[in-house]
Image: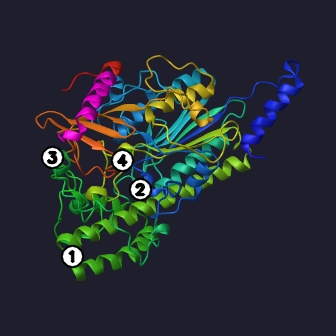
């Protein structure tokens, strides 16, 4: 019986039996919230990717729901995590960019789940500088985390664990599930480091894409005409480091050919350290793959466009190999839920802290309010009440996670939370007054990486208005239907003046409503 039929049958049963024979209240759902780091929709099978297969993430979508319009409110690692925990925008939760520290004293959904009787845990990436609060159990990566032999902060101590980050984080997740208190519901935040830069695959996945080249995105050679902020960034694949990003050895590359997003960063030294974290066996497998890559580079010495395209292939293949490891490990967790009889009553969420550029506009990284980094993958499975095989086009935000999970746990959602529970959407009852526009704001400048100008804006179902602030003071307007790749800024186009006026009105009303009217 599929879940929809099952739900109808159980409602039918209740009606037939009458109120006197009402079933005992259902137990609160368990929660496994899986968040990857920098995992773009373009690299997930369920979203139509032709680049990589992700059968386990796809399984969550197939047995539940896929959201095609899921977005973040500030497209960068730590801020997105603070939004997840608090259900509040950056200007309200205080974590505006990666330099800020998270104020762990504020209200978060894990704390409220604890009050509601849940055991709460987080394993893997944390990245909020201050120690986790609201978790009964936590083992988190130190800072960004390393791919090989990563350091975990565990009971206040740093513990180095041999092995590969994605496997190790999954081991910790399964270990928590195995040792949990079986009398109480659990909420486990299972957060991967991958596929964040510097994209070091598990050695067992290095053979993927052998002898095969990946297609260049249509916008790879974007000239950024009419978009000064897009022209001024430092996140072009053409400028990636040959060492830390693309894994060439010093004797081969000689000198770096790119800025890599942060002038003066000692990329060669960083790469030596990353490489040295592998065991002799891992290094042997690594060298067996990268030795020939280094050798081919030494022979060909690509320059100009050929070098940029060579970098694209190297970057994207390693990124996708990291994704393959995540998918394999998500499969381990889904299998565990099946074996333990937990699948039916556990909400499984798979998402990322934001989207990412896989060569679109010639870029890697995120930050911009353009579609690839504004969007984030989101699939959810909860067989007990969420019908399988659904696709939602509703505009949903990372701001909605906290209220949704509290709603399912039967805990009150505090007024200060600015998102809205996704529950009616998950259960196939989209509310008529669901949002049709949302507000975005990015802050990290001039400090930090990649020189992306601070900006804010509004996205509606069809249009987008962006204001790059400060001395740049440039407005951009996109028509996503006519120009899905956002190549033509129509802010000054005569045909768009009434749309422009309407977008300004929507933006101002959202800023007022959300209490963010400070441009500085
Ligand atoms: Ca991230």
- Please report whichever mark, 1 or 3, sits nearer to the chain's N-terminal start: 3
Q: Can you give x and y, in whole percent of width and height, for residue 258 in the image?
A: 18, 61
**Stretch of the chain drawn in magenta:** 491-511
- Please report whichever mark, 1 or 4, sits nearer to the chain's N-terminal start: 1
Q: Does any portion of residue 314 appear in the rendered image?
A: yes
Residue 497 lies in magenta, yes or no?
Answer: yes
- Please report whichever mark, 2 or 1, sits nearer to the chain's N-terminal start: 2
Residue 155 lies in magenta, yes or no?
Answer: no
Q: Which residue is mark 3?
A: 228
Q: Can you give x and y, in whole percent of width and height, for residue 233 in the image?
A: 19, 49
Q: Can you give x and y, in whole percent of width and height, for residue 339 in the image?
A: 73, 50
- Cα–Cα span, label 1 and label 4: 38 Å
- Cα–Cα span, label 2 and label 1: 28 Å
Q: Main secondary structure of the magenta part?
A: helix
Mark 1 surroundings: few (<14), some (14-19) or many (≥20) residues within 10 A:
some
SS at circle 3: helix
């Amino acid at each position: 019986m599929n879940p929809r039929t099952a739900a109808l049958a159980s409602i039918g049963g209740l009606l037939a039996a009458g109120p006197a024979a009402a079933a005992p209240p259902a137990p609160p759902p368990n929660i496994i919230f899986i968040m990857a780091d920098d995992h773009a929709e373009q690299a997930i099978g369920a979203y139509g990717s032709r680049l990589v297969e992700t059968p386990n993430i796809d399984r969550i979508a197939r047995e539940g729901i896929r959201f095609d319009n899921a977005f973040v409110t500030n497209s960068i690692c730590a801020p997105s995590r603070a939004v997840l925990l608090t259900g509040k925008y950056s200007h309200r939760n205080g974590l505006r960019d990666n330099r800020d520290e998270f104020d762990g004293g504020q209200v978060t959904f894990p704390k409220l789940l604890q009050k509601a009787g849940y055991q709460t845990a987080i394993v893997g990436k944390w990245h909020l500088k201050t120690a986790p609060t609201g978790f009964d159990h936590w083992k988190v990566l130190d800072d960004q985390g390393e791919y090989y032999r990563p350091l975990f902060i565990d009971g206040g101590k740093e513990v180095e664990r041999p092995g590969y980050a994605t496997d190790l984080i999954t081991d910790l997740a399964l270990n928590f599930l195995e040792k949990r208190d079986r009398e109480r519901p659990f909420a486990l935040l299972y957060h991967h480091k991958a596929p964040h830069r510097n994209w070091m695959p598990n050695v067992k996945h290095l053979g993927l894409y052998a002898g095969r080249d990946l297609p260049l995105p249509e916008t790879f050679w974007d000239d950024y005409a009419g978009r000064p902020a897009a022209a001024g960034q430092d996140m072009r694949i053409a400028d990636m480091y040959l060492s830390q990003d693309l894994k060439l050895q010093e004797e081969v590359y000689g000198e770096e050919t790119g800025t890599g997003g942060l002038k003066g960063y000692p990329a060669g030294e960083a790469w030596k350290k990353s490489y040295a974290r592998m065991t002799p066996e891992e290094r042997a497998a690594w060298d067996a793959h990268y030795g020939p890559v280094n050798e081919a580079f030494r022979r060909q010495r690509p320059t100009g466009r050929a070098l940029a395209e060579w970098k694209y292939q190297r970057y994207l293949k390693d990124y996708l190999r990291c994704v393959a490891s995540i998918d394999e490990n998500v499969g381990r967790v889904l299998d565990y839920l099946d074996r333990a009889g937990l699948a039916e009553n556990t909400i499984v969420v798979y998402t990322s802290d934001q989207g990412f550029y896989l060569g679109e506009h010639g870029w890697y990284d995120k930050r911009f309010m353009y579609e690839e980094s504004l969007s984030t993958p989101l699939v959810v499975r909860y067989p007990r009440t969420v019908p399988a095989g659904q696709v939602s086009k509703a505009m949903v935000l990372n701001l909605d996670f906290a209220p949704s999970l509290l709603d399912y746990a039967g805990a009150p959602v505090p007024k200060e939370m600015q998102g809205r529970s996704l529950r009616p959407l998950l259960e196939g009852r989209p509310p008529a007054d669901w949002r049709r526009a949302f507000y975005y704001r990015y802050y990290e400048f001039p400090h930090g990486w990649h020189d992306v100008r601070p900006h804010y804006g509004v996205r509606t179902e069809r249009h987008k208005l962006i204001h790059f602030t400060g001395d740049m003071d440039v407005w951009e307007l996109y028509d996503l239907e006519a120009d899905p790749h956002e190549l033509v800024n129509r802010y000054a186009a005569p045909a768009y003046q009434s749309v422009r006026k309407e977008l300004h009105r929507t933006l101002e009303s959202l800023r007022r409503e959300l209490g963010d009217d400070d441009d500085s």
